[in-house]
Amino acid sequence: MLVGESTRGIKLEVPSQELADELVRRFGGSVESAGPVWVVTLRAGLEEVREYLSGHGYLVVDGKWASLKEIFRLLRRGTGICVCPICGSPRIRRVGLSGWLTPPLYRCDDCGYVGRLVLLIEPERSNDA
């Protein structure tokens, strides 16, 4: 998750030391704190880091790091709205004939993202059951 952004780079909270080290090696910067959440300062722009993370299976959903297992569980449930994992636009659609032997391929009309991964945003549920 984004902690801060400046002209010199960005500061992120990441869920593991391995990811923190990987990002510092890739973009340069430093690990500022460790614990249950690692804070890294990177010498890169937000879009560049977001693209790298989404291309390597790392996603933030509702402000929390989400595993692919959790995302697939939500997709199987079939409720909610699909949005682009890069820009968050709901203007994402299936393209081609994929989906039978391979996962469906999606394209975002806003940012041009093409990939098999989309975010499913579900409506909030009331706890008054």
Image (cartoon, rainbow, N blue to C red):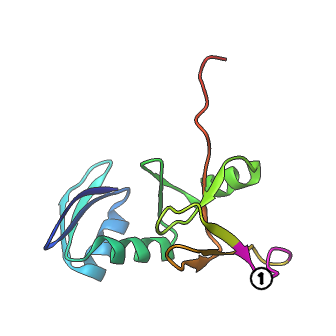
Q: Quadrant of residue 29?
A: bottom left
Q: Is residue 58 above or below residue 38?
A: below
Identify the residue at the far top of this view: 128
Q: Is residue 26 above or below residue 124?
A: below
Looking at the picture, tell me which residue is in the foreground, 38 or 81: 81
* Left or right relative to 1: residue 90: right
Residue depicted at x 42% and y 48%: 63
Q: Is disc 1 surrounded by few (<14), some (14 to 19) or many (20+) residues within 10 Å?
A: few
Residue depicted at x 35% and y 56%: 1
Image coords of residue 2 (percent x, y) = 30, 58
Which amino acid type is marked by label 1?
Gly
Looking at the picture, tell me which residue is in the foreground, 25 or 97: 97
Q: How many marks?
A: 1
Image coords of residue 94 (percent x, y) = 72, 72
Q: Is residue 67 visible?
A: yes
Task: Name the element at disc 1.
Answer: loop
Q: Quadrant of residue 99?
A: bottom right
Disc 1 designates what residue? 96
* Left or right relative to 69: residue 62: left
Q: Is residue 69 visible?
A: no
* Left or right relative to 23: residue 7: left
- In the image, the segment drawn in magenta is 94-100
Prevailing SS of the magenta stretch:
loop
Image quarter of the C terminus: top right
Looking at the picture, tell me which residue is in the foreground, 80 or 58: 80
Image coords of residue 17 (percent x, y) = 32, 62
Magenta highlight on residue 7: no
Residue depicted at x 31% and y 51%: 37
Image coords of residue 86 (percent x, y) = 48, 69
